[in-house]
Image (cartoon, rainbow, N blue to C red):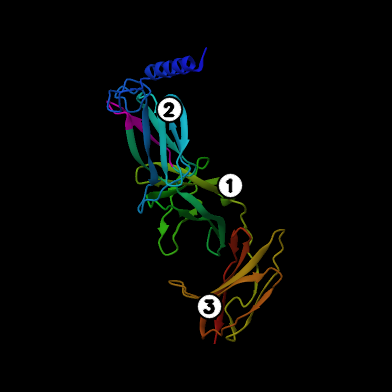
Amino acid sequence: MNNSRRVYFYKLFIHAIMIFFGINLAGCDAPRINPYDPENPNYAFATLEGSVQTFSLPYQSIPGVTVLWAPANMIVNTDNNGAFKIFNILPLNGKLIFQKNGYLADTINVTWGNSKMLNFQVNLNLIPQLDSISLYTVVINEYTPPGQYSELVINSRILDSDNDIDTVFVENTKLNLKTALPYNASNKIYEAVLSTQQLNVSNIEEIIGLSFNILTEDIFGREFNVGSSEATRVITNGVSIQFPANDTTISSSPDFTWQRYNTGYSFNYEIDIYTNDLANPQLVYSAQNISSDSISYQLSTPLSGRDYFWVIWVIDQFQNRSRSLPATFIVQ
């Protein structure tokens, strides 16, 4: 076969291929007949696209969101601008699912109708995060019956950039406990002090080793378990105060002394001095982080003349604490 015949058959072959795939040799304005041509009105496939942003203002793009087109089990991820695109899919009605760790998943029910391209703007709600939690027991020794008062203190700081928290709860199913933690706006924490009655126990030691969950409920009624903490210890015995006590009259700057407190764990002392006013005692002096090796303390500020009482706390590394019986004295 000579070269001219080869060229002829080659052109014939190319022409046949172009006809097979619907390529119009006459010009670009001719009708599109190729079902795989996106410009063909009968194009068989469709496209989903859009972007994902934060729930709260100012809106910010969220990269790395997993976007699942359920009918075809196709997955893409949003780019650095929060954008996504899924193309060459059949226009079957179905679910478009958005997921990212730390965010509440969202689902869109897609109905195509006569469209072959749909665009969605999605806003994902950030799940609140537990920033810190402090949970400790308090035992207060008293002369009046029953002689001892116990409580559980809970402080929790929660991060919520969407600002849609309605209520924060502390929960323990074993104790049949679920109670709200009021918000302290000045300290920006949720906190509560729960008595043994509120904890549904007769003895505070019953809560040792139990886990207390922190739950948030948002303005839409959705509830999330954001973290938990355990009650670690109850310090029942208080320190024995030696001096001053029993209405002893002293100078304005005495040495405060007590018996050494022996225990098998790390702790510090705290001293609090109050005016001896049964109706409304006022804290006038406090000293924290006194070494466990100490058995005395010298006031750094003289006291004015009047009646007082003082107490000493034992506080462990988890903030569990026990307060001594009060001791009274008089400054001339």
| Residue 253 versus residue 289 in the image, above or below | below
Q: Dot 1 lies on which element?
A: helix
- The amino acid marked with disc number 3 is Tyr
| Residue 157 versus residue 244 in the image, above or below | above
Percent from the top left, x then y, of residue 160?
43, 52
Q: Residue at x 59, y 67 (%)?
A: 325
Q: Residues within 10 Å of mark 3 (few under 14, many from 20)?
A: many
State the CA–CA distance, disc 1 to disc 2: 49 Å
Residue, disc 2: 70
Observer-side mark, 1 or 3, equals 1
Q: Dot 3 lies on which element?
A: strand
Viewer-closest of 279 and 300: 300
Residue, disc 1: 206
- The amino acid marked with disc number 1 is Glu
Percent from the top left, x then y, of residue 98?
42, 37
Viewer-closest of 274 and 299: 299
Q: Residues within 10 Å of mark 1 (few under 14, many from 20)?
A: some
State the CA–CA distance, disc 3 to disc 2: 73 Å
Q: Looking at the rendered structure, which numbered label has been put on residue 96?
A: none
Observer-side mark, 3 or 2, equals 2
State the CA–CA distance, disc 1 to disc 3: 35 Å
Residue, disc 3: 308
Specify whether residue 213 is in view.
Answer: no
In this picture, which residue range is highlighted in magenta? 104-117
* Disc nearer the start of the sequence (1/3): 1
Q: Residues within 10 Å of mark 2 (few under 14, many from 20)?
A: few
